[in-house]
Image (cartoon, helix red, strand yellow):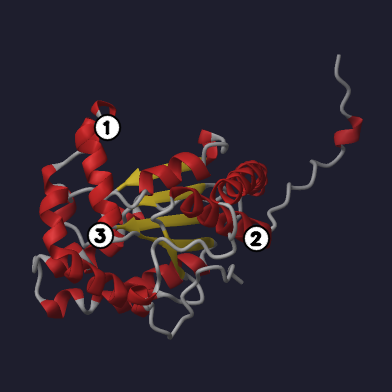
Amino acid sequence: MHPTLHAVKPGSKAGIAKIDPSSTPGFKGDRDQVRDRAEKELADNTAAIAALQERLYAENTRALLVVLQGMDTSGKDGVIRHVFSGVNPQGCHVTSFKKPSENELDQDYLWRIHQQIPPRGEIGVFNRAHYEDVLIVRVHDLVPKGVWSARYAQINEFEHYLAANGVVILKFFLHISKQEQLERLRARLEDPAKNWKFQAGDVRERQFWKDYQAAYEDAITKCSTEWAPWYVIPADRKWYRNWAVSTIVRQTLEMMNPKYPPAPRDLHKVKLV
């Protein structure tokens, strides 16, 4: 079982173009009031996630993998910072997948991904993931179509294998508009405190916007499964993005319902001196 909020039903189209990136389903009314409500619920969610993570760590039989994908500036770092701020670093590991190294290119494309799958008892967060191998390679024609098009089925089988071995998988597409991306890039240019985030390559990639949207549509449609669902999160409003992701992560952990292991036998006989 997985939460249904913003989930893409297996076998149905993602329909990214029909989803308003600035929408905030479930939040209507005064702008400041709904934002305050969302931020309070975010705080509740992060506290609950922290408590549930402790139980997951103690149980040590399953793992949770959270995959974050999205266009540049969509807020992957922001989600990590806000949603997982309360978890114990011992039980949560973040991996940022960048351009493959020479050694990684000498392996199959899933090799480096499998290296970072969270062990039992832990939460793993992927900032980008194996989906780059059906996104950027497609948009920039880095491998033949026959190669990347075969990867959808391979990815589904890989994720099915992980799920069968105790890894619960959540995949989030942070859906922003082209105009919102422009404003965020401009902020990085104009704010000295954000200059370090700016990369000229992000601007060049904007010319491939439609190609990336088509690539995401196919990846999400073909790879949203019962064992590893995709969630399309409207992400123009940062507060809503953080609330939605935190809500789904919390609900998933609650459904997993990790339990503390039983106390060792004869623990009652132990005497401290």
Q: Residue at x 83, y 42 (%)?
A: 265
In what element is the residue under mark 1? helix
Give the quarter of the figure containing the N terminus. Answer: bottom right
Is 135 placed left or right of 155 in the picture? left
Q: Residue at x 87, y 38 (%)?
A: 266
In what element is the residue under mark 2? helix
Is 231 placed left or right of 49 in the picture? left
The residue under label 3 is 178
- Residue 267, located in which quarter of the rendered image? top right
Q: Are marks 3 and 1 in contact (CB under 8 Å)?
A: no
Please identify, in this view, whether the residue under mark 3 or under mark 1 is nearer the observer: 3
Mark 1, residues whose alpha carbon is within 10 Å: few (<14), some, or many (≥20)? some
Q: Which percent across, then down, holds residue 23?
A: 46, 63
Along the viewing direction, whichever of 104 and 67 lies nearer the viewer: 67
The residue under label 2 is 256
Please identify, in this view, whether the residue under mark 1 or under mark 2 is nearer the observer: 1
Give the quarter of the figure containing the C terminus. Answer: top right
Q: Specify the farthest residue to the right.
A: 269
The residue under label 1 is 194
Q: Amino acid at mark 2?
A: Met
Q: CA distance from mark 3 to mark 1?
A: 19 Å
Q: Amino acid at mark 3?
A: Lys
Q: Amino acid at mark 1?
A: Lys
Q: Which percent across, then down, holds residue 225?
A: 45, 76
Q: Which percent across, then down, holds residue 163?
A: 50, 67
